[in-house]
Image (cartoon, rainbow, N blue to C red):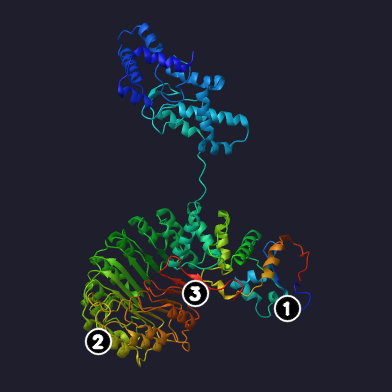
Amino acid sequence: MLTNGHDNSPSKYITLVSSDGFEFVVLREAAMISPTIKGMLRGQFAEAITGRCQFPEVSGVILEKVVEYFHFWYKNRDKEDVPDMDIPVELCLELLVAADYFGLDSKLLPTTFYKTTQESVVLTFSLAFFALQNKHEIPYSMG
Amino acid sequence: MSGARQNRAARGIRGPQSALTDFLASHNISAFQIQQDAAARRRAAEEQNGVDPSNQQDDASSAAVPTAPITAATETTSPPTTRRGRRVAAESSSREEKPNKNQKVLDKIKASKKFQKRKKELDDSEDEYDLLQAIFKERAAPLPGQMENCAICGKRFTVTPYSRNAPDGGLVCSPCGKELAQEGPAPKKKPKRTGGAVGRRRQVQSNILDGTYQPGAKSLMTLCIETLAKNIDLAEDLGDLPPLVIDKIARKLSKHRLLDPRTLNLFLQPSTEEVYIYDGSKLSADDYIKIFQTVPTLKQLKIRNGIHFKDEVMDYLLSRDIELEGFYLHGANLVSEAHWKKFLQEKGKSLKSLRVYWTDKHFGDEVLAELEASCPSLDRLKASHNQKVTGEGIKSIAKLKSLRHLSLDLRNHVHSDVYVHLLSEIGSDLKTLSLARVPDVDNTVLDAIHTHCRSLTKLRITDSEFMTDEGFVRLFKGWENKPLEIVDLQKNRQLEAAKPRENPDGIGLCSNGFRALMAHSRKDIRQLNVHACRHISAAAFEDVFAPDKEYPELQKLEISFCEEVNDFIVGSIFRSCPNLRELNVFGCMKVKDVRVPRGKILVGVPNALGMIIEGNEDED
C-alpha cells in the first residue's frame, strides 16, 4: 500500500491506526524508537508488508500525542538541552500507559540509529508531519 | 503670587534659620512642620480626652501658616491651606499652570526608566498623561517615616516604603492596603525562569552527574512522570499501571519530597505485591500501619527514611497474615531489638531478602544470630551502617548456607580472620560479595576469595590499607571463578602523607593487580570502579586498554583520582570499550583535551568547558 513507487523498498512512512479509526502517517525512522512498532515491522507480519499498524487499545487522542512525540524525538534526536514536550495534564496517566505499551522508556538508547540524510529531515517538516484523517485513505502517495 | 515668593515670605517671617533647619530643609524635612504636626496631634488628643476644643483661631492660624514644602515637587506650588489642600493644589498647578520647575520634574519623570517601562504597556496618549500624573503623585507623596492620613479611612498612619497608593490618589494605611490587595487582581505570574544559557548548561552537567543525561529528547515516559509529579495533587488514583512505572513515579515523587500520607494512598492498591517508599520521612506510624491494612498481598516492602517505622508498626505487621519475601528498611532506629527478633521468629520463614540500613542500636549481633534458625530461605542479606554489628554477627552469618548475596558495611573493626572464616563456610555459592570500608582487612581475605569463591559476579572491597598488589595478583591469576561483572575496588591504596607517591610495599590495587583483574574479567565486566587507586601506572592502563584488547560489556568506568590517566589513556579506553556509556575522570589532572565520541559521557574533566563531543549528526 505505502510502498515506494520506484522499487520494492519499504516506504519512508508508515500508518498508525487508533482504536477509533484515526490514521496517522508517520516517518518510519521516527516511529522506530518504539521497540513495539519496530517489532511489528520486522519480518513478514502483515504490518511489515502493508506498513500499517493497528492499535485497538489506543485511542486517537493518545495516539496523536504519541505520534507527536515520535516527531519531537526525531527532530531533537541529537540536540543537547532539548526543551520538554508539553504533556496535557488530563492525558498524563493514559499517556503513561501508552508510553509503557510503546516501550518509550528511558532505558532506550536512541544513539543506535543515526543514519539519516539531511533530505529526509527536510522532507518530514515540509510535509505536514502527520495527516489526521478519520476513516479516509491517505490522499497523497509517497515517493 | 508664586509659591517661591510665598516660601521666601514664610521664611522671612520666622527670621534667620539655624544650620540644622537648613540641613533638614535640604533633606525635605521641615522642623516647622514637625512642630505643627506635634501641636495638631496634641490638640486632637485633647479633643478626644473631652477637654474643651481648642479655639478656632488657633486652628485657623496654624492652618493658614504655609508649611515648608515636603518634596521638591511641591516646592513651587501655590500656597496650600492644609496638607491635603496642598496636594490638590500641586495637582492642579501641574495640570493647568505647569510652571517651569514642575515641567522640569515632569520631563525628568518622562525620561525615567520606570515611566518608559510602564509606557510600553499602554498605547494611547491619554493613558500616557494619566501615567505621568500617577508617577508625579507618587513622587509627591510623603517619604517613608512621615505621617499621613489614609486616603480611604482617614486615619493617621506612618508612611512606609510598602504603603500602597489609593485608587484615586493618596496613600492608604496598612489595614486598608491589605483590603485593597485582596480586592485587586492577582499579581501576574512571573514567566518561568530558565536560568539562561549558563543555567541550562549547569542543568545539563547536573544531569550528567545524576546519570540521567542522554542526548536528545527525554523519553515519553519520563515526560509523563514529570508532569504527573508536578500535578500529583490532581491525581486520585494511578489506575492500572505496570509495577515498573509505579516504581518510577514513586522515585520521582520522593525526589521532590512529595510523598506524604495523601500521596501514599496512590501506591497502596489492594492487589499489589510491592510497595516501595523512597522517602518515608513525612509518614507517621499510622501511615505505615495503613500499608499493611490496605495491601494484604504485600510481598516486597522497601522503606527509606522510615523514621516512624516503630515497634507499634512491627506489632501490627506481626498481627497480620502478611508474609514478606523482601524487606528493606532504612533509618528505622525506633524498632527495638526484641521486636526485630520477634519479627524474624514469626515472619522469617518466607523472608528471602533482608536489607537493613542505618540503625544505631537495635539491629546487632543478636538479631543476626536469630537468622539461622528463623530464615531458612534467606538469599540476600545486607547490613549497612549498623553500629551494633561486630565480628560475632559475621560468625552467625557464616552459618547461613542459603545465602547468595552478602553486603556488609560495618562501623566496627572486624579482623580479617572473621571474613576468612565466613568465606570458607559460605563463599562457594556467593554471587555477590560486598565488603565496604574495611580498612583493616588484608591479603588473607583475598586469598580466601581465591580459594573458596566460584560463582561471584559482583565483588566489592573498598578502603583497605593492608591489601597489596601481590595479593590482588594472587586473587585474579588462575581464579576458577567466571569473569566478574561488577567490580568495585575503590580506595584500596596506601595512605602515606609524607611520601604519597612512593609505595615500596605495593600497598593497594596497583599496576599488576589491575592487569590481572582485567585479564580475568575481560569478557563480562560491566562496571568497574578503581577510584583513587593511585598507584596504577600509565603503562598498566596502556597495556590494559591496548588496541588489541576489547571489553565488550564495559558500560561504566570510574578512574577518578588515578593520577597517571592522561588524554591518550582516555582515548584508548573509548577505543577498547565500544559500549562504554560513562567514564569518570575527576581529579585526573593530566586529562586536558579529549574528544568524546558521540553517545558517550565523560565526567569530571578538570576544565570549565566540560566535555567536547566529537562528530556531528550526519556522522554515524
User: SS class of the residue under badge 1?
Assistant: loop
Occupied quadrant, residue B503: bottom left
Q: Chain of mark 2?
A: B
- In the displayed structure, would residue A129 be above or below residue B98? below
- In the displayed structure, would residue B78 be above or below residue B197? above
User: Looking at the image, which is closer to me, B203 or A112?
Assistant: B203
Please state which of the two labelled residues, at mark 3 or mark 1, is closer to the viewer. 3
Q: Chain of mark 1?
A: A
To the question of a shared chain for discs 3 and 2, the answer is yes
Which residue type carries mark 3?
Answer: Arg
Please state which of the two labelled residues, at mark 3 or mark 2, is closer to the viewer. 3
The reply to whether discs 1 and 2 touch (Cβ–Cβ < 8 Å) is no
**Mark 1 lies on residue:** A9
A25 on left or right of A108 = right
A116 on left or right of B109 = right
The reply to whether discs 3 and 1 touch (Cβ–Cβ < 8 Å) is no
Distance (Cα) linking label 3 and label 1: 38 Å
Distance (Cα) linking label 3 and label 2: 43 Å
User: SS class of the residue under badge 3?
Assistant: strand
* Image coords of residue B494 (percent x, y): 26, 79
- In the displayed structure, would residue B352 be above or below residue A75? below
